[in-house]
Amino acid sequence: LTDPTRIVRYPRPRGAPAAVADWLLAVPAGPRRVKPEEVLWGLDERPPPAILLGVAAQHVLVALMVSVFGVLAARGIGLGPRDAASFVAACMFWLGIGTLLYGLRSRFTPGILLVNIPSSAALATFVAVTGLYGPAAAAGAFVAANVLLFLLAGYLPRLRAYFPPEVIGVVVLMLGVSLITQAVGGSVGMDSGGPFSLAALAVSLATLAGIIWASVWGSPRIRVMAMLIGTVAGVLGAFATGLFDLAAVKLIADLPAFAPPLPGRDIGWPVLVPAAILPVVLIELLGATRQAANTLTIDKLNDAKWRRADMALVARAVRTLALCNLPLAAMGLITAASASSNVGLARASGVMSRHVAIVAGVMMAALAFVPAVSTLIVLTPGPVVGGILIYTAAFMVVAGMDLILSRMLNVKRSFTVGISIVIGLGIYVLPGLTATAPEWSVTIVSSGLSVAALVAIALNLLFRIGVSQTADLLVDLREAGPGVAEFLEHWGKAWGARREVILRAGMAIGEALEILERTGAAAGHAELLVRFDEVTLVCTLRYSGEPLRLGAAEVDVATLLDTSDEAIIDAQMRQVSAQLVTRLADRVRSEGQGGAASLTLQFEH
Amino acid sequence: MDIAEHTEGGCHVVAVAGRLDSTSSPALEEVLCARVLAQPAVIVDLQQLQYVSSAGLRVLLKSAKAARGAQHRLALAALTPQVQEVFDISGFTSIFQIFETRRQAIEGTR
């Protein structure tokens, strides 16, 4: 009843490194994905070169526009304009390398379309730890945290029960909510403390209208350019309303055409300071939850029949993030996070190909050698970024709801979702709430996203206490149906099982019980034993009697319709029953000995 | 199982809700076989049907044969995904005219 591990092997390179390459490129195959109809190019499909380059360029554009956190980090640790530009350029190079790695599928990398940006979650901690303990201690803390993250990532597949879809859904939803301040503030010109601006609002609405028009009413060719169309509409609006800083553009002319993307300062060797490491480890672990949320959102968008979290994929995405963060941290740069806005772009464009990540990563790394680009990042009009972030926030909120509702909700799960969202939103609504928190904890408790994630994880753990993963029921064969359905419904909710799996199990068991009663294979009562472990739902019927023999012959529908011979109809209807049981379940085993028999039905979850 | 009947757009509609299994199927057999003989067009609305077993399928088959013998029309409407799966697996999808909604069934049957 167990699945053999399937291994996908890529063409083996020749020569001495062959064994190492073979080991690196051997990836256990994930679930078979069914491409949704709205997806134009799936994960492993390679779009034509023009589309590939066009979409990758849009991803780079979006990533650079939301890379303002890199600029804020540089300013936060007190770097001047020249050093800040070098800081951003060096970040961009390693973010590009990380993005490229996301696109490759190997033992350590996921092979999906994610794009790295400077981490907004790490920003406050990075600035605070650098200020308190110095740049070498900050570098040491982020290196240590990411080594730990890399090592822990391998255990994520075993932790699926602790990160069920409703917990990840809360994180995705709160990721959307966490963007609202920057999205709406930027859209009306209030992000940098200025007054409400109608011109900024107009520019933001033009950006948003461009994205919505292209992704809702555009042809496939237009859809892939949705974010670019929105950006162009917004930038034109910024020119028209005088919001584009033309004077600053002239500064670019004074910059050299090319320069190596090296950080603008020498921080020496990283130093390990325990007090600095603790908050950084917590922030980077929360970053891993966010990485899981973005990875699973991309995974779900790529599979019309998405069933459960592919935690092996999440583990590889987290490892890649940790790998990318190591050089960033060691050089005293802010660490990375995959960008939700690029997940939004993938959805709007319908291009999910991992090849886009590879091309976008190369583009980002190459652009890091052009100082004008990092300078231009700062010049993107705030309302244009605001419009893009409104679209992203809206999409993430709905994607989070979708994940939450992919499982059956009971009282416990409703509380897990509801309370964590309410407390997380409370932090945003009442920012003074955490004013008296200990200094070391401020960077965590002042983030509604972090608090909601921690509360959801904690409540899920709490509510798992005492919930048995097996249940049994004594069934009266003469009136079994409704009781079995209610029993499965009850435990399905307790376990958070998918509703369609529970319904299918109810259908198959109901049919099996009818066969037992009709054929006289069993009499009186049967015991139904159900076991659930997130991956499979196993239902075993134990009874006194003969083991069922379920034939594999197809039903002859034409004969059924034409004949009036009851014996032939009986025989054909027995085949209908057998077909229903064997095809509703994913695996069936019937056995018996000494007058005791059992029928085991396994359903993939 | 609950059975409700009404006339709509020139068709006789039999709405079946709940579970259609070996326990409840005799009640539907009694109603449906009589209606397909008496009415020229019958729609079985399955929107509220949560479960159907082979015993339920057999009743529907018997009704389809009775309707064919009387040269009357019988159509099914609004199957839930789990009931549709049972029809697909058993091959019964090819026996009946099946419509996505009751409205479409009425327009396609009268």
Image: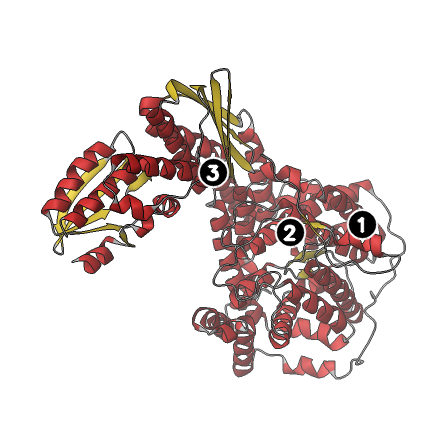
Same-chain check, marks 2 and 1: yes
**Circle 1 residues within 10 Å: few <14, some 14–19, many ≥20:** many
In x, y percent, where is residue B75?
Answer: 23, 51
Residue A341 sits above or below residue A546 on the image: below
In x, y percent, where is residue A484?
Answer: 38, 28
The residue lying at 38 percent from left, 18 percent from top is A525
**Circle 2 residues within 10 Å: few <14, some 14–19, many ≥20:** many
Same-chain check, marks 2 and 3: yes
Between residue A243 and residue B100, name the one nearer to us.
Answer: B100
Residue A528 sits above or below residue A385 on the image: above
The residue lying at 52 percent from left, 55 percent from top is A34
> What amino acid is at disc 3?
Ala
First of labels 2, 1 by sequence position: 1
Q: CA distance from mark 1 to mark 3?
A: 48 Å
What secondary structure is found at the residue carrying circle 2? helix
Chain for mark 3?
A: A
Residue identifier under label 1: A143
Residue identifier under label 2: A291
The residue lying at 74 percent from left, 77 percent from top is A372
Q: Nearer the viewer, mark 2 or mark 1?
A: 2
Chain for mark 2?
A: A
